[in-house]
Amino acid sequence: MARIVLVHGIAQEQKSADTLEAEWLPSLAGGIRLAGDAALADTLWRDARPGDARMAFYGDLFLKDGQQGGADELTPDEWALAEALAAEWLRNAASSASSEADRNRAKTELDLLGGPAGETQGVRAAARPVLNALVRLKPFARLGVAFAERVVVKALKQVTLYLTDETIRERVQARVAEHIGPETEAIIGHSLGSVVAYEAAHLHGRPLPLLLTLGSPLGLRTVVYERTRPQPPSVPPGVASWVNLADRDDLVAARPDLSGLFPGADGVLDSGYTVDNGAKPHEAAFYLAKRRTGEALSRALTSGGQA
């Protein structure tokens, strides 16, 4: 059981709970230190004790023994979702990218795409026009369309498996539940981990001072929002404070302000905050190191979630 439960996102299957804790905890302590709570920062990092903060690791559940090329290949239905995800990322960039040039480029690409892409080209080819449009925007511009496709495929495979495969979902939630108990004061989730953390908070059932979601796709209607549990989505009961942070250029965080999507948010969900993570807008460590992250955690751990 842990005071703070950490939940990672996609593409962590080659790591472990220990390596991710070593990556996350210094950044988390740094954000708390920026918020002015040096004592708590030292407690979580320099003077850390077993049980203070633990990573709920589930990346290995996406690995298969003896798996070779094509491991992340999508089914036809998943390729259709890939196109929808890429299109939503592009629309998000058009409306909220920090750079006017990127916003204008995204709008131009959307105009050029017009109707459904690739209607007669087959399912996989259908996603390519949207991916080709994405690759002309940050953060894909320097990396080429092949990388953009791998990102979407990896994201969709793991997100889709979690949201549609009952066995995977139960096993992931079991990993999180191993660390949650009466002493748990905060659950922090990044990317897909924010979806896992949100559902875990619903399952937890006890009072929880803080749910902190970072770079969250919970507002992504085409893939995530309508597949979360329970339905219809709502603020988890027992959560005293839910803080959601997003970088304006984080395409995964399709809708930074979640308050209109989750009934019960009044006075609980503190959303719409934007941070600047520089060249790596979706980087977990950069979210964790922010003053706003530290403020939320310091307040929850020192006052039981009461302002």
Image (cartoon, rainbow, N blue to C red):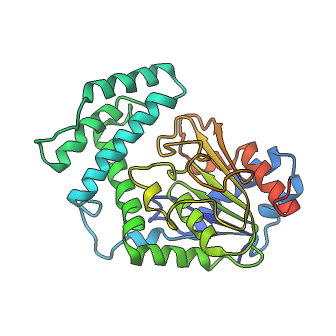
Where is residue 142? Give x, y as percent: 39, 32
Q: Is residue 174 left or right of residue 165?
A: right
Spot occupied by residue 233 in the image (x, y as percentages of width and height): 54, 60
Residue 93 lies, with reference to residue 213, above or below; the image says: above
Q: How many marks?
A: 0
Q: Residue at x 58, y 39 (%)?
A: 247
Q: Position of residue 2 (x, y in %)?
A: 72, 74
Determine the image quadrant of residue 131.
Answer: top left
Up/down of 101 relative to 20, above or below: above
* Residue 30 appears in the rendering: no
For this view, does 216 lie left or right of residue 274? Answer: left
User: Which of 263 and 303 lies nearest the eye of the viewer?
Assistant: 263
**Among all residues in the image, which is located at the extreme left?**
120
Q: Nearer the viewer, residue 112 or 225?
A: 225
- Answer above or below: position of 103 versus 219: above
Horizontal side, residue 272 vs residue 80: left or right: right
Q: Quadrant of the N terminus?
A: bottom right
Residue 49, quarter of picture: bottom right
User: Is residue 75 in sight in this rendering?
Assistant: yes
At 62% across and 80% down in the image, what residue appears? 178
- Vertical position of residue 239 compared to residue 1: above or below: above
- Expressed as whole percent of the image width and height from the top left, the position of residue 298 reads 82, 55
The residue at the point 33 percent across, 74 percent down is 64
